[in-house]
Every structure is written in structure tokens, then in C-alpha cells.
Amino acid sequence: KHTGGSLVDVPSGIAGVRELSVAMNAIIEEALWAYGYVALWVSLSAGVIMYNKYVLAFFGFPFPVALTMIHMAFCSAAAFLLVRVFKVVKGVPNMTRDMYMSRIVPIAALFALTLWFSNTAYLYLSVAFIQMVKALMPGVVYVVACVMKVESFSRRTMLNMIMITVGVCIASYGELNFNWTGMSLLLASIVCEAVRVVSIQILLTSADIKLNSVTTLYYVSPACFVFLCAPFIVIELPKMMALEESMDLNPAVLLSNAVCAFGLNMSVYLLIGKTSALTMNVAGVIKDWILIYISSLLFDAPISNTQLGGYMLAFLAVCYYNYVKLKEREVATKPVNPKVDVASNPATTKVVE
């Protein structure tokens, strides 16, 4: 068609609109799936924590080690089916017995201690307060990494960690139902988790062993189950035998709790696989606030203004730390432009090394 001295290809214009529409629909669909994975992980993560609190403190099963062992047994069996039977997820091809004993077993031992201490803390502390104290994690990981020569010391970063600690201390001071036993267990779990995180970098990353949430269950959960047998036999089994006649438990509750725990790990696998670890970190910030609010209502655990003020300080310090680490990662991964030959390109006015 001739219009005003120019040719307009009407069919090609329509095709372009259609292509743009298809591209926009694909982007919207991808975004909806990403939001769905985030919502799934946030729901399961918060749900599992509150479900564990219910089982341990209200259901009548105050045995955190036994509960953790049920989780590990179920997750081990489910991961075995996914990796070895249905082959939905690939295992580590170069995993040898010596490698497993020297690199996986130490991490499993630390994981067992982390779960043991953290789940026991739910018997003494509120879910909301535990989430607030867990804001210490970046600081403890940083200190452990510096001690183990994985991270270089920085005064600015240490000042940031001090701000996080001050915020958590204020939140602890404002806790209405503070308990030293629960606090000690919680801090021990945070230290064990920090050592585990740094050990993963030393033992696995250095050996180019990459584990996702499913293969982690496959390799770590069985060893974790074995390590938990010792505290179970010594501490909890005698108590369970003494209370055997008075315990009236519904196995469906314990099984559903284990299913939720495995579902949480699967949601981590989907979230990181379909989005990124950064998305999970950002979603984790939202999850913490949701969990603090909902758990305080469900379990009738009041939160003081002092507590909220302290956690807000720690929260802002953690957000700043994550922002700085993100910028450092962007600089580290940014490609370096080669030197430009100005003589052969007179239009170039700046040389980037």
C-alpha cells in the first residue's frame, strides 16, 4: 500500500505485533512462575517452622532429636528415590568413599548439631524471638570465615556486624519471655551453622563438589541421622520410655510434618533452580517479617516495642551487608575490557584497563 510516498508493509506490521505479544506473554508467564516459587518457599519455610513449634511445644512430643531423626529418615528415603530410582536429579558422579568420609561426613555432623540445638530452642523460646536472634547469622559467619582464613578482615564489615549484634542485644533485652537455656542453645546452633557454611566452602567448593537441596539430602541426611542417634539414645529415649503409657500421639501428624520438611527442601531446589540464590535471600527477608507477625498471633507470644526496635536495627544492618556483598559480587564478575588501541581508533577518548 502506498501512503504519502512511503511503503507500509501491513502484514509484517501485524506479525511484529504478534511476536511482541508472544514475547510479553512469555515474560509475564515466567514472572508468574517466579512469584509462585517464591510464594511456595515462603509458605513452606514459615509453615515448617511453626509446625515444628506446634509439635514440640503443644502437640505433646517434646523430643526435638527424635523429630529431627524422623525428618532425616523421610528425606533420605525420598531423596534416594529421586536420585537413584526415578533419576529425576543427578548425583555427584565423582563421589568416592574417601571423599564422602572426608568432605560430606564433617558437614553432616555440623548439620546434626545445628538441627539438634535449634529445634531444642523451640521448647524454651518463641518463634518470633528465634527469628530475630538469627539475624546474627551473617556476623557469625563472617567471624568464623575470618578465623578460618576464608574471608579477609575489614573494619567496615566488622562495624556492620557490631550494629547487627547491638540490634539483637536490644531485641533480647525487650524479650518478655527470655530464657537463658533456650538462648544458649540457639546461639550454639548459630555457631554450628556458621562453621558448617564456611566448611562447605572449604571442603566442597574447593573440590568442585556441587550439591543442590536434593543431593544434599541424599548425601548428608543419612549421615546426619546416624550422628543424631547418640543424643537420642542417651537423652531422649529414656524419657520416651518413661512417658510411653501417657503419650497418645497421632502418627499422621509426625508423618505430615516430615512431608512438609521434605517439601521445603524441594521448594528450595525449585526456587534456586528457576530463579537464583539472590531471589531466595530477598524472599527470606520478607519471610522473616511474616513469620514474626503470624507466629506471635498463633502462639500468643507478645512482642514489645523495644524488641521490634532492636530487630529493626539488626534488620537494616543485615540489608546493608547484603547490599555491599551484592555490589562486591557484581564487581568481581564484571568482565574486564581489554586495552583499546587509541592510535587505531581515533574516536576513542577513554582507555579502560
Image: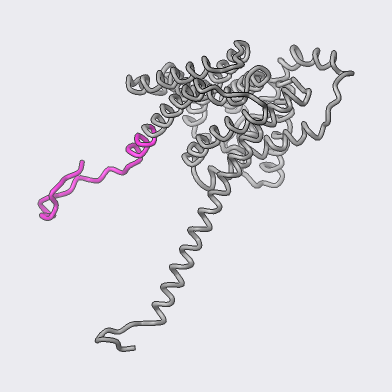
The answer to whether residue 101 is visible is: no
Camera-side residue: 280 or 298? 298
Which color mode does the image show?
Answer: one colour
Seen in the picture, residue 245 relative to 286 is either above or below; the reply is above
Quadrant position of residue 263: top right
In magenta, the rendered stretch is 325-353
The answer to whether residue 278 is visible is: yes
Residue 269 in the image, given as x and y percentages of width and height = 58, 42
Residue 85 in the image, given as x and y percentages of width and height = 72, 44
Residue 230 in the image, given as x and y percentages of width and height = 72, 15
Quadrant position of residue 154: top left
Camera-side residue: 324 or 93? 324
Seen in the picture, residue 264 relative to 164 is either above or below; the reply is below
Residue 245 in the image, given as x and y percentages of width and height = 89, 18
In the image, 259: left or right of 295? right
Q: Is residue 342 magenta?
A: yes
In the image, 210: left or right of 301? left
Q: Is residue 292 magenta?
A: no
Image quadrant in which the C terminus is located: top left
Image quadrant in which the N terminus is located: bottom left
